[in-house]
Amino acid sequence: MAIIDDIRATAIAVPLRRPEIWTDGSRGGTNAVIVEIRTDTGLTGYGEAACGPGNSADPVLSVIENVKALLLGQDPTRIAFHANRFNGIGRWRLWRSFSNFALAAIEMGLWDLAGKMRGCAVSELLGGRLCDSIGISGYVLHDAPERMAEDAKRLVADGFAVLYIKAGLSEEADERTVRAVREAVGPGVRLRIDANEGWTRYDAARNLRRLAAYDLDMVEQPLAARDLAGMAGLRATFGIPIGANQSAWTFDDVGQVIHDDAADIIVTGPQSLGGLLPLLKVGGICEAAGVPLCRHSPAELGLSAAAGAQVLSTLRCLDDAHQSLDPHWVDDIVAGDGVRVARGRQPVPTGPGLGVEPDPVRIADFAARYRKDGPFVVRTT
Ligand SMILES: [Mg+2]
């Protein structure tokens, strides 16, 4: 039996080609932590942790450092056992909205190891895949309306059937950008907006009345995460599909959203849920409730994207427009094109484990950038 004999964590900073702007501010890139879990038999499993916009990698590194003692000397294949210990002995469930990022990276690394030890992709460990790729929405970064219109047309020409833009900036800006994108791509393209909790109930009522004219495919997180009654009310009043993202951050949150009829689509993913097992379980909840599951991208990179795709490929009740910042990174952290989005679809990698391997040169470059320039922060002016 292999045992875990070393765990390493590396903070990286990965720039975007141009800043991402949303209701909270703007950022030039993302901070992440790459975890390596090594066994005494010479195998390495890799995982990736998001850090949340504007946070340094320090809190994630701290959680990983604290969890190490629960894993060293242990059998890496007992993934559910280890996850229970993080949340039981470690009490990380008390902090899960944040600590789940770190636990996701570790749990992902254990799945990578489990697949490599058996010589198969993680999806094969979960029963086998139902699809070989997943649909991705084209993310039109917020910018001047004319620039967004051009970007939207290019994404549609590149094969994206669903577009995603940010809202919640101001009433005027929201209508300007939605109108510009809708007019640029015409009526046949599905258009989603994400207000990132930026509206009050009053704002949402005003904005949705105006924006209904642009045939919105989905409005994501119009209200504060806690306001499930408000979300349910918007569904009933406007008839526009509502997505729960910050409201569906953790496993328990998803159950509450379904119970309260607060969303038409659950938008969550391996990072906020704390790994692949909870994502699999959320997939079951969504199937039972008849509510599609859309993968949220908290600026995830190639390792996390591949991990999520392994699970999503085994699920039945899937959305067809998962989220990705893929076209906007200056570069990714994985070798090859195994998880690159093309023609609006992301392939589910077929190699052992997560199916992708980190590129050590690119990770070293992004780690050097983090050390030299520090983490990306959120600017609010
Ligand atoms: Mg969102």
Image: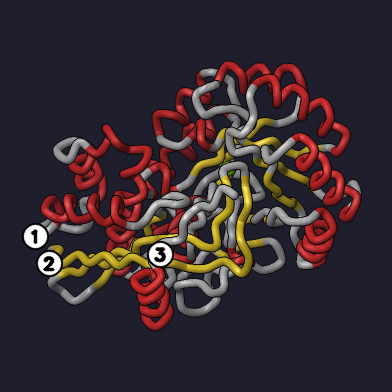
Circle 1: element type: loop
Between circles 2 and 3, the one closer to the viewer is: 2
Q: Amino acid at mark 3?
A: Leu
Label 1 sits on residue: 73
Q: Which residue matches tag 3?
A: 354
- For mark 2, what is the residue? 5
Q: Position of residue 65 (x, y in %)?
A: 19, 55
Q: Is residue 251 left or right of residue 18?
A: left
Residue 261 is drawn in which quadrant?
top right
The amino acid sitting under disc 1 is Gly
Q: Dot 2, how many residues are within 10 Å of its Cα: few (below 14), some (14-19), or many (20+)?
A: some
Alpha carbon separation for disc pair 1 and 2: 6 Å
Q: Are marks 1 and 2 in contact (CB under 8 Å)?
A: yes
- Badge 1, how many Cα within 10 Å: few under 14, some, many 20+? some
Q: Residue at x 33, y 38 (%)?
A: 96
Rendered location of residue 354, percent (x, y): 40, 64
Earlier-in-chain disc, 2 versus 3: 2
